[in-house]
Amino acid sequence: MVKLCLLGGEKVPNIKSAIKRVDVIRTRTLRNASLKSNLRTTIRKFDETLDGGSREDAQAKLQKALVTIDKAVTKGILHKNTAARKKSRLTRSFNKLEKS
């Protein structure tokens, strides 16, 4: 017998430990969504700075983006290879700005 939640229509487990796991998953999902949003925002701000900002400002935004990416890896949001690829692309785009 499966219980149905009245609000979302989702299935609710019967076992106590499974109910606890659902709560943990919900909190982690919210945290992960927040961190991913923060990551995308910092990368977008760096890209905007590349278009019209100064070199020093772009360098500061690059450092912040790199730190944010590293934090996402330590918290399990991004895989380390994905983070390395993102960091490499951001650094390359900054170096192109520097050369021009």
Image (spheres, rainbow, N blue to C red):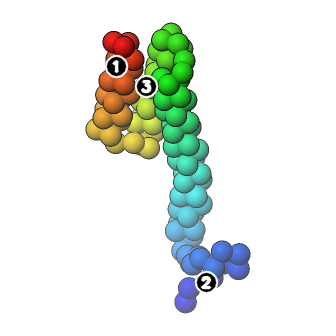
Q: Which mark is residue 96?
A: 1
Q: Which mark is residue 59?
A: none
Q: Pick the residue in front: 57 or 99.
A: 99
Q: Quadrant of residue 29?
A: bottom right
Dot 2 and dot 3 residues touching (CB under 8 Å):
no
Q: Badge 3: how crowded within 10 Å, few (<14), some, or many (20+)?
A: many
Observer-side mark, 2 or 3, equals 3
Distance (Cα) linking label 2 and label 3: 45 Å
Q: Earlier in the sequence, mark 3 or mark 1?
A: 3
Q: Residue at 56%, 43% (x, y): give it.
A: 37
Q: Which residue is mark 3?
A: 66
Q: Residue at 66%, 74% (x, y): give it.
A: 8
Dot 2 and dot 1 residues touching (CB under 8 Å):
no
Q: Pick the residue in front: 87 or 51.
A: 51
Q: Badge 1: how crowded within 10 Å, few (<14), some, or many (20+)?
A: few
Q: Pick the residue in front: 29 or 61.
A: 61
Distance (Cα) linking label 3 and label 1: 17 Å
Q: Residue at 44%, 44% (x, y): give it.
A: 77
Q: Quadrant of the N terminus?
A: bottom right
Instruction: Check disc 3 and give the amino acid type.
Output: Leu
Q: Earlier in the sequence, mark 2 or mark 1?
A: 2
Q: Which residue is mark 2?
A: 3
Instruction: Check disc 2 and give the amino acid type.
Output: Lys
Observer-side mark, 2 or 1, equals 1
Secondary structure under tag 2 reads strand
